[in-house]
Amino acid sequence: ETGVTQSPTHLIKTRGQQVTLRCSSQSGHNTVSWYQQALGQGPQFIFQYYREEENGRGNFPPRFSGLQFPNYSSELNVNALELDDSALYLCASSLDRKNIQYFGAGTRLSVL
Amino acid sequence: GESVGLHLPTLSVQEGDNSIINCAYSNSASDYFIWYKQESGKGPQFIIDIRSNMDKRQGQRVTVLLNKTVKHLSLQIAATQPGDSAVYFCAVDHGKLTFGTGTRLQVTL
């Protein structure tokens, strides 16, 4: 167990809806990164938050947004859901920006 | 940018044998590499890491080798066990992780 928890574990939405995914980082970790993992693929970097500020973003449109709270937990918001957004969304926390990232079990999002 | 590739999508080994999983990366400036193991229904689990100032690092039953000249790294698992069955990813760490597509390790009895 990594101490990184994500909720919910599964979610079903319809196209055009909005979704919020949550992540609690491991105790003492100030950096949270979000990844999208399509079936059969490696995780793709969405963005990273360090001390409540966005610290790098991957090749994802602006409808993917995030937030980090003072306790370093984080949210991933996706607006105007598309079918291709169906994936496993992974959160990883680390002690700092360039330390080992420890992953949660992920949230499986299905968009119908 | 960085691209990471794994040489084999699937590797089948007998229990007790050694496993070798290979990975290639594209950016010669990359200096930090991590291997993750992902079991079905779980998130990636850290196995071992290596920085570019080393060419070999050992953990419990695992060894990572880094060849910067040809931009290649490998993960060796000694005495492979059924519990080692999973998908293995190498990742290059630039603050964000760039993953390969993964190698599925199947352990046969």
Image (cartoon, helix red, strand yellow):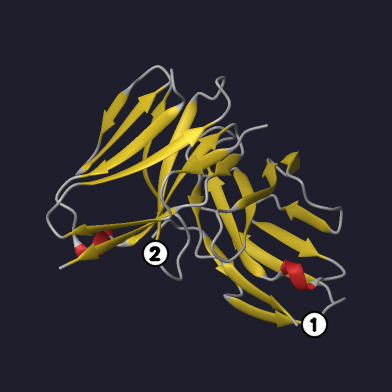
Q: Is residue B28 above or below residue B59?
A: above
For label 2, the SS is: loop
Q: Which residue is mark 2?
A: B39
CB-based contact (under 8 Å), mark 2 and mark 1: no
Amino acid beneath label 2: Glu
Residue A64 seen in render: yes
Which corner quadrant holds the C terminus of chain A? bottom right
Quadrant position of the N terminus of chain A in the picture: bottom left
B61 sits to left or right of A27:
left
**In the image, is A53 to the left or to the right of A39?**
right
Give the residue displayed 39% in from the left and 64% down from the top: B39
Horizontally, is B3 left or right of A79 in the view? Answer: left
Chain to which the residue tagged by mark 2 belongs: B
- The residue under the point 56% across, 35% down is A96
For the residues tagged 2 and 1, is the chain the same?
no
Q: Is residue A80 above or below residue A27?
A: below
Q: Rounded to the nearest whole Å, what is the CA distance between mark 2 and mark 1?
A: 28 Å
The label on residue A14 is: 1
Q: Chain of mark 1?
A: A
The secondary structure type at the circle numbered 1 is loop
Specify the amino acid type for callout 1.
Thr
Residue A88: where, in percent of width, then height? 60, 66
Instruction: Give x and y (percent) for residue B64.
Output: 31, 34
The residue depicted at 83 percent of the width and 78 percent of the height is A15
Along the line of sight, the residue nearer the viewer: B10 or B46: B10
Residue displayed at 62% across by 33% down: B2
| Residue B50: percent from left, percent from top | 39, 29
Q: Which mark is residue B41?
A: none
Give percent across and percent down for residue A80. 87, 70
**Does residue A72 appear in this view?**
no
Assess disc 1: are there few (<14), some (14-19) or many (≥20) residues with their C-alpha within 10 Å of its C-alpha: few
> Dot 2, how many residues are within 10 Å of its Cα: few (below 14), some (14-19), or many (20+)?
some
